Structures are given as C-alpha cells and as structure tokens.
Image (spheres, helix red, strand yellow):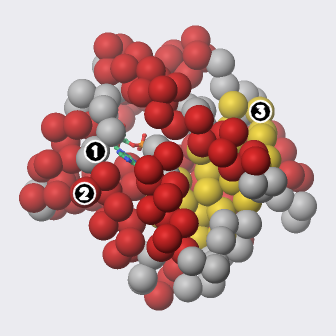
Amino acid sequence: MRLLIMGPPGAGKGTQATKIAEDFGIAHISTGDLFRANLSLGTPLGVEAKKYMDAGEYVPDSVTNDMVRDRLTHDDATDGFLLDGYPRTVAQVTELDEMLGSHKLDKVLVLTADTDEVVSRLLNRAQKQGRSDDTEDVVRRRLEVYQEQTAPLIDLYSSRGILVTVDGLGSIDEVAQRIHAVLNV
Ligand code: AMP
C-alpha cells in the first residue's frame, strides 16, 4: 500500500501517520522527521533545512526531492510506505510522480482541522516539545504557506480519484478509527 497523508500543521498528521504505518506494516517517511534527524546529527542538509524550518518556510525542492528520492530506495519502502509531509507543492507532486513511475499512490488521506484549533494545538506542542518552529508567528506563517502551496494538492489528487478526507478533530483513537474506515480495512 502506497499512501500519502496531508493536512495543515497541527492537524495530528504525525501521530496518525505513526499509527497507520504500524498498523499496515509500512515504512513511515516523514520529511519533517528526516530534516530534524539531519539537524540533530549536524549534517549540512540539516543545517541548511533549519534556516527555512525556523522561518516557517518550505525547504527548497533541490534539497527535499533528492532526500525523498534516496529514502524511497531503502529496503523497507519496497512493499509500501506512508509519505508524511511530502509532496507539499505542485512541483513536488510532479517530481514524486516521476520517482514512482507505474507504482502510483493508492490513496491520499487529508486530515482536516480548523485554524483556531490547530494554532492552539501547535502552541501547546511548542511548550511540551520545545520545537523552534512552533512560536506563534512561525505557526501562522506555516499555516499561510500550507494554504498557498499545499492546499491546491487536495484538488489535484481529488481529480485523480484517490483522495479521502477525515475529520482530524477528536481523540487519537477516534481519528484512527475514521482513518481505518476510509481506507477500507
Ligand atoms: P513537518 O514536521 O511535516 O511539519 O515539517 C516541518 C518543516 O520541515 C516544514 O515547516 C518545512 O520547513 C520542512 N518540510 C517538511 N516537508 C517539506 C517538504 N515536502 N517541502 C519543503 N519543506 C518541507
């Protein structure tokens, strides 16, 4: 099964993605996690990515696409994967299409959540996890960038007939149940 999960920052994507990948026994490929792992190791890629992440902007495609292309070649991704946070732009969709060739995505899952709710979730998470991209200004910028650059992907994948939408508000288990229901398993 080849899946993509998308939704605004703070919609609970990461938590649900971890659960789905475990439940289906597929690789969880999160570009945000890959950037953060690089950052904690102090790699040049991590140092470069941090500049953009801290401003709430997207890391340039030249960095991001190659990182995903490489990750998809790992053995654990052969039988399926859940992409989390990639693609995030129309240009990245084109790039991913080319990487996947005939092994197209089976479903694209969109988690929805209203803006006030996601802002308060993100600020709450900032206090608990101390992520440097969770301050209020950066949170608002990340939401704007999502609306401008990532929300258009919803129509794009909808026109391909593979889009499913799930309400992201509720407990972790409630949302997980809704996801299982739309994935028909
Ligand atoms: P996330 O953990 O998915 O919220 O991602 C954290 C940050 O990593 C984002 O705000 C971006 O700065 C960067 N990032 C993650 N995925 C991508 C992507 N596909 N394209 C560009 N930047 C990304």
- Quadrant where ligand 1 appears: top left
For mark 3, what is the residue?
167
Q: Residue at x 44, y 50 (%)?
A: 91
| Residue 180, image x, y percentages | 82, 55
Amino acid at circle 3 = Asp
* Residue ID for mark 2: 63
* Corner quadrant of residue 171: top right
Against 89, residue 114 (above or below) is above
Q: Which of pointers 3 and 2 indicates the residue nearer the eye?
A: 2
- CA gap, disc 3 and disc 2: 32 Å
The amino acid on which the numbered mark 2 sits, given as a three-letter code, is Val
Query: Quarter of the image holding residue 41?
Result: bottom left
- Against 144, residue 59 (above or below) is below
Evaluate whether residue 71 shows in this view.
Answer: yes
In front of the other: label 1 or label 3?
1
Q: Is residue 149 left or right of residue 127?
A: right
